[in-house]
Image (spheres, coloured by chain):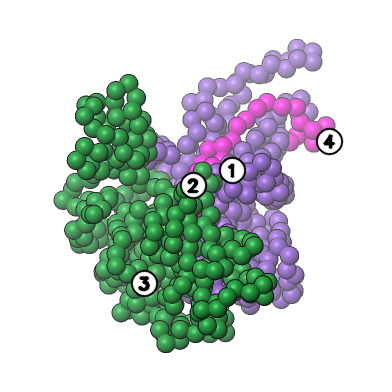
Chain colours: A green, B purple
Amino acid sequence: MAICFPIHMSFRIKVGLRFFKFLNEKCPKKIHIRLAAHRVNTSVAVNQRYPKIYTPGEVITSQNEFMRGHGTYEENGDLKSSVAGVREQVNNLISVRPLKSRYNGEVGDVVVGRITEVQQRRWKVDTNSRLDSVLLLSSVNLPGGELRRRSAEDEHMMRQFLQEGDLISAEVQSVFSDGSLSLHTRSLRYGKLGQGVLVKVFPSLIRRSKTHFHNLPVGASIILGNNGFIWICPTINNAEESVGGFIQNLEEVIPRQERETISRIRNCILALAQSKMMLFDTSVLYAYLRNPLSTPYLNCWYQRRWWTSRY
Amino acid sequence: MTLCEAEKTFVLHGVEENFRIDGREREDYRPMELETDIVSHAFGSARLRLANTDVLVAVKIEVDTPFPERPFEGKLEFFVDCSANATPDFEGRGGEDVAIEISNTLSAAYHSPKVFDLRKLCILKGRKCWKIFVDILLLECGGNLFDAVSLAVKAALWNTQVPLIRQIDIDGNNVELKVSELSDCQRLDVKTAPVMVTVCKIGEHCIVDPNVAEEQCSVGSIVVSVSENKFSTVLQTGTGSLHSSTLLDCLKLGYKVAQRLDDALWSTLSKIQPTEDVGFLK
């Protein structure tokens, strides 16, 4: 299924370079206070066409041959939008895809999450969904052999494996009836994350693809979680990782070169997200390579925190 | 949000390297956005956005009686409101501690007559004075609240229009004032109003303008408020203690950065055109 949201998929970064003009304002010591009137509109349109964005309560159509899908409701015979987003139509079914929403998980999605709680035989994980996801003790690969029974000792050791605040990459195993997710890390790719940076974007900006783990040729790895959490870290050595998913090397000092690459990728992702460009390996790499600066002075780009409290 | 050990290590090493996670150096600020006169029914207002920190300040003015011990002075009062939209921690009474800390620090910073002269707010000795209420609303917290609040307060006070007194009628104990229209007002003098800088100690080094992740990695920080070339308040937050030489370094760094911050604010304020409304919805 093609996701035409909100910019057309034919990705033309050339059009979108307006926002990189900012980066040339390289002035490390001066403090910038911009007036709101001088704000630059960073949204990028392909061929000057923006998709129409519906606001909650706006009439989508008054003809009643259409069926109402997600994000719509009927009132006085009109089909109205219940969220702010772009319209999607499949035959007679009209739905509105919200611009900003929490993550609605699907089985098989790759997610990046943060442990919020350690409970009986399970961890609670914040994955940017409406409800915290669960990671069962039985769905992780324990150190020292994959196929072994979970003993009472393992239950007592749970906090040694993963504790509150730890970041993990995982896959969605199943979706419960209330929409909360059950995760698993039963693969060597998944597990606890080491040193690096977490960036949060809208989940709708992550393009679904075959793999969400990318070793970028510029010298960094990214995990584009379907839930909008993106993990950027120094290039992962696959041989090293097969030890098991619970080892963090806190002694290692990441060299300046890699640090610069990571910061640049972070800022590129935020720049793309601010312009509502879809995120996948090519778009991130293009943005990175188009950045004309050798130094990553990109701190105009910051994370937009768009959710409020839980709803 | 709690960070894991590995993330903290990454931040810590970045600060040591003088290359922070967003590519800034230790003394760099994130870019800010300022708008004044954003609340139409206030005497003065400003909104400052520092990356993810968003602060709205509105100033209102009332006629009041001066304190008996200070008959020649007006009054200045700060009130901080933490919106639960900012972080879920502010729900209920959660933001009270932060609010009180900020408003107390502001009162202390504006206390000295060399910083903000309250005598100019006196209307009639011992009888009438202006009372200025500065209401601060925290809309979002993205780290570095003190700096953002102090800048927004300064900008809002700069924007404030104090009505002129046209006529005073005294009839026994009754005092009647006739004030000018809103179109004919005078501005407050805020040239010496303080600017606060949070100097955060991470590892062995001090940084300014910490974001949320960096605030979590730090053991403590020093908030200095600088008015022109003088310190008006110094506040220590957090649990850690500081060596005297570190404290001195923090103060020096804070002073230096506060000068730059003040210059930046003035140059921005001077660029303001009267008819450039943006508001919240754009």
Residue B84: assigned label = 1
Q: Position of residue A102 (x, y in %)?
A: 44, 50
Q: Residues within 10 Å of mark 3 (few under 14, many from 20)?
A: some
Instruction: Provide the residue designation for mark 3.
Output: A213
Tag 1 secondary structure: loop
Name which of mark 3 and mark 2 comes first in the sequence: 2
Output the chain of dot 2.
Answer: A
| Quadrant of res B60 | top right
- Residue occupying the point 59% across, 42% down: B83
Magenta span contains residue B47: yes
Residue B69: assigned label = 4
Q: Position of residue B13 (x, y in %)?
A: 54, 78
Marks 1 and 2, how far apart at CA: 26 Å
Marks 3 and 2, how far apart at CA: 29 Å
**Magenta stretch bounds:** B45-73
Q: Horizontally, is B279 left or right of B180 in the view?
A: left
Tag 3 secondary structure: strand
Output the chain of dot 1.
Answer: B
- Do the dots labelled 1 and 3 sit on one chain? no
